[in-house]
Amino acid sequence: MNTFSKRAIWLAVNSDEYGDWLVEIAQEHTRLARELIVNKHLTDENKEIFAARIEQLRKERDSILRQFEGR
């Protein structure tokens, strides 16, 4: 798990270029994680698909936040 400074997060979320995108990433990640927890009827295949998508979203988020670290 990457740890980013509060400043980097604040700058990224408030940037015109990435702010909305970060919110969309967070919303999708939350929706998928909730579905994994709540929906007991998901197949193992769907669970793997959801987990892979969550990992992809984390990588996208981290890539964006890395750009703002140290500013």
Image (cartoon, rainbow, N blue to C red):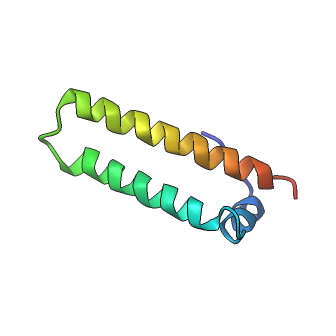
* Whole-percent x, y for residue 64 in the image: 69, 51
Q: Residue at x 35, y 49 (%)?
A: 33
Residue sitting farthest toward the front: 17
Q: In the displayed structure, would residue 2 be above or below residue 18?
A: above
* Whole-percent x, y for residue 29 in the image: 43, 52
* Whole-percent x, y for residue 21 in the image: 57, 60
* Whole-percent x, y for residue 30 in the image: 39, 56
Q: Is residue 68 left or right of residue 44?
A: right
Q: How many marks?
A: 0
Q: Residue at x 58, y 60 (%)?
A: 22
Quadrant of the image occupied by residue 68: bottom right
Visible residue check, residue 5: yes
Q: Is residue 65 left or right of residue 57?
A: right
Locate the N terminus by quadrant.
top right
Q: Residue at x 27, y 34 (%)?
A: 47
Q: Is residue 39 left or right of residue 70?
A: left
Visible residue check, residue 3: no
Locate the C terminus by quadrant.
bottom right
Quadrant of the image occupied by residue 36: top left
Q: Residue at x 70, y 64 (%)?
A: 17
Residue sitting farthest toward the left: 41
